[in-house]
Image (cartoon, rainbow, N blue to C red):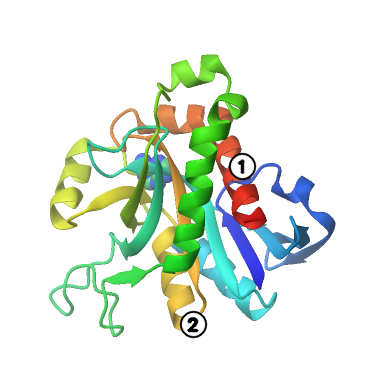
Amino acid sequence: MRLGIISALAEEQQGLVEAMESPSRLIHAKREYFVGQLWKIDAVCVLSRIGKVAAAMTATTLVEKFGVTHILFTGVAGAGDKNIKVGDIVIAESLVQHDMDASPLFPRFEVPLTGRTHFMADHRLGQGLLEAAQWFLDNHLEEAISETERAAFQLAQPRIHRGLVASGDLFMKDKEHLNKLNGELPGLLAVEMEGAAVAQACHELGVPFAVIRAISDNANENAATDFMRFVKSVAAQYAFHIVRRFCEQ
Ligand code: ADE
C-alpha cells in the first residue's frame, strides 16, 4: 500500500509532513509532494489547493507519477443538512458534483458520457476512517482542543455521519441555495469543493479512495467567518489525530 493524502489547504494537513519519517520533497506541476513514511505506511502528502480541477489534477498526479495505490482526502466542509453541526465529522459514502448540469443533453448531476451522477468511495477505507474518527472523538478531543475552543464552537458532543457529499466550484454561503440542493440530493450531508473530483479521477484510474471532512460552517450567510475561524484553530487537530490513528490501525 502507498497512501496519497490530499488536503486543499495547509491548515487541513498541518503536522503530517512533520510526522513523516525521512521525507523527501518533490515539486511537480506547481505543487509540493512529500514522500516518506507515516506511522510505518508509505505515504505521499500534498496540498491540492481549492476546487475540482486542482483536486482532480492532484489525485491523478499522485497515482500516475507517485504510484499511490489508495487516496485519502482530509479537510473541512459546510453542513449539507440541518442535523449536521459544526464540529461533526462526515465520511463520504458517495459523492456528486453539484454544479454539473448538462441538461437537457444529460440528466442533472450526471457527468456526461460516464452514465453516473454519484461516485462511490471505498467502503473499507471509510470503515477505517470511521473507527479512527470515533476514537478521536471518544478519547482525544478534549486533549487536542482547548476548553475555550470547544466552547466557542459548541463542540459538546460531535457526531460522525456517513453518506452523500456534494462538491462544486462554489463556496456555499446562501441558505436558499443550500436548501434547493438539499431538496435535489436526498441524504446530502456536506458540501465542499474537491471530493467528487477526486472521486471521478479515482474511479477512472481504478484507485480506491476515501473522503473525510470536519464540518466548519453551515454553508449559510455566516459560512465565510465560521470557516475561517474553524480552519485557523481546530481543523488541523481533527485531521492530524484521525489520520494518525487511521495509519496506526
Ligand atoms: N468548505 C467548507 N465550508 C464550505 C462551504 N460553505 N462551501 C464550500 N466548501 C466549503
Residue 15 is situated, as x and y percent measured from the top left of the image, at: 71, 42
Task: Please indicate whether residue 171 sits to the left or right of residue 51 in the image.
Answer: left
Q: For ligand 1, tell me if the residue under mark 2 lies within 8 Å.
A: no
Q: How many labels does the image show?
A: 2
Task: Please indicate whether residue 91 sits to the left or right of residue 177 in the image.
Answer: right
- Ligand 1 sits in quadrant: top left
- Dot 2 falls on a residue whose secondary structure is loop
Residue 210 is situated, as x and y percent measured from the top left of the image, at: 48, 62
> Dot 2: few (<14), some (14–19), or many (≥20) neighbours within 10 Å?
few
Q: Which of marks 1 and 2 is nearer the N terminus?
A: 2
Residue drawn at x 54%, y 30% as measured from the top left: 141
Residue located farthest toward the bottom when viewing the structure as drawn: 113
- Residue highlighted by disc 1: 241
Circle 1: residue type: His
Residue drawn at x 52%, y 77% as measured from the top left: 207
- Residue highlighted by disc 2: 206
Q: Which mark is residue 36?
A: none
Name the image quarter holding the C terminus. Answer: bottom right
Task: Please indicate whether residue 228 sits to the left or right of residue 180 in the image.
Answer: right
